Image: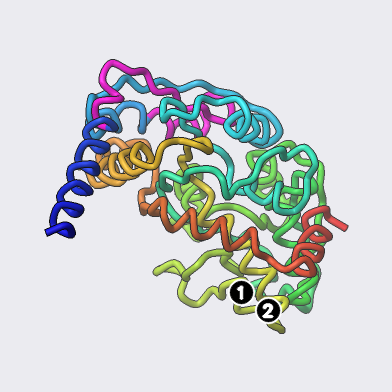
Amino acid sequence: MKMKLWLAAALLGCASASAQAADFYEGKVVTIVVGFTPGGTYDQMARLYARHMPRFLPGKPTIVVQNMPGAGSLVATTHHANNAARDGTVLGVIGGGTVWESILGNPQARYDPKTFNWIGGKSRDNITCLVWHTSPIRTIADAMKSEVIVGATGPGSRTMTFPKALNDIAGTKFKIVAGYPGGNEITMALEKGEVGGYCGWALGSLKQRAPQWYDDRKVRFLVQFATARDKELQDVPLAVDLAKSPADRDIMEFLTSDAVLAWTLLAPPGVPAERVALLRSAFEAMLRDPAALAEAEREKLEIDPVPGVELQALVERLARTPPATLEAIKQINGGK
């Protein structure tokens, strides 16, 4: 009898907490803080969420977008950790590599990524290394025998870290030329023949911004930093498969995590668990909704949802990376 009374009370308590969480959003304004400037893919993604996610949150709050660019979204990430409201009315869109900064010991990264509440991701990236179609380099094996110049922005970027990791671990001979302001400038250099390759270009972004290059085979793919091979690139190896030892594989797996963390939505630390559950449920429902999917297709936003619980587990696993592996990654990430 006592057990039945206890179960009834527990169920009633859960129902009451759920109702309170649902009522919370009625009449509220939720802000998505984006760590990048307006007009880019991160901003575009956040505005898609702002238009469609309210329909799936009880109380149907208004969602607005605020841009807070700086240091590759480090400014916004620090804001979420230290200044943002912890009641579920502030959400964030940040770059995946920002998660690494704290784990790798960047003193400016004043946050613990494990404490964030990861709501979900719009898709898993496939980050490629590629060469122009006129290059004599045809496979990653060729890049282990002959030098190829690749453009890069600077230390800490995919465009420098990924070819550096391949040089150190797989024995490729990428000559990294840094100093390009961004990916657009690297693609122009590739087309002009200033560089022979681009290592760190997400496949989805390539298809969106240069579809003719993909369709007309203007580029040749050498390797994929991804959790699985793209269905159309089954003959292109994964970076993790090029590792020659368990320690090297750990490094490649750490770097490949950028492909899963690339397009995430998070909530600050300390948000009540029931609101986190509501946000995750709304996010997943939104990315199954025909209207949201149709708009994403029109805007060429790839959708392949990553559940929040998977992101949370990934971040916690990254935080447990052995010190020796982290030190090796620091050397690669710093371009040394």
Q: Residue at x 60, y 69 (%)?
A: 223
Residue 240's tag is: 1
Please check the rendered image and state whether residue 190 is part of the magenta-colored stretch, yes or no. Answer: no
Label 2: state its secondary structure.
loop
The quadrant holding residue 82 is top right
Q: Amino acid at mark 1?
A: Val
Locate the N terminus and report the quarter of the image it occupies. Answer: bottom left
Q: Judge the density around disc 1: few (<14), some (14-19), many (≥20) Cα neighbours within 10 Å.
A: many
Q: Nearer the viewer, residue 115 or 325?
A: 115
Return the x and y of residue 38 as percentages of the image width and height. 53, 24
Q: Nearer the viewer, residue 270 or 163?
A: 270
Return the x and y of residue 301 as percentages of the image width and height. 39, 42
Q: Judge the density around disc 2: few (<14), some (14-19), many (≥20) Cα neighbours within 10 Å.
A: some
Label 1: state its secondary structure.
helix
Q: Which residues are magenta?
A: 22-47
Return the x and y of residue 275 as percentages of the image width and height. 35, 36
Which residue reaches farthest bottom?
Answer: 245
302 sits to left or right of 20: right
Q: Residue at x 70, y 47 (%)?
A: 102
Q: Amino acid at mark 2?
A: Ala
Query: Where does label 2 land, which residue?
Result: 243
Q: How many marks?
A: 2
Please check the rendered image and state whether residue 23 is part of the magenta-colored stretch, yes or no. Answer: yes
Circles 1, 2 touching at the beta carbon (< 8 Å):
yes
Q: Residue at x 69, y 58 (%)?
A: 197
Return the x and y of residue 3 as percentages of the image width and height. 18, 59
Q: Is residue 284 above or below residue 125?
A: above
178 sits to left or right of 38: right
Q: CA distance from mark 1 to mark 2?
A: 6 Å
Locate the C terminus and report the quarter of the image it occupies. Answer: bottom right
Q: Residue at x 39, y 42 (%)?
A: 273
The quadrant holding residue 79 is top right
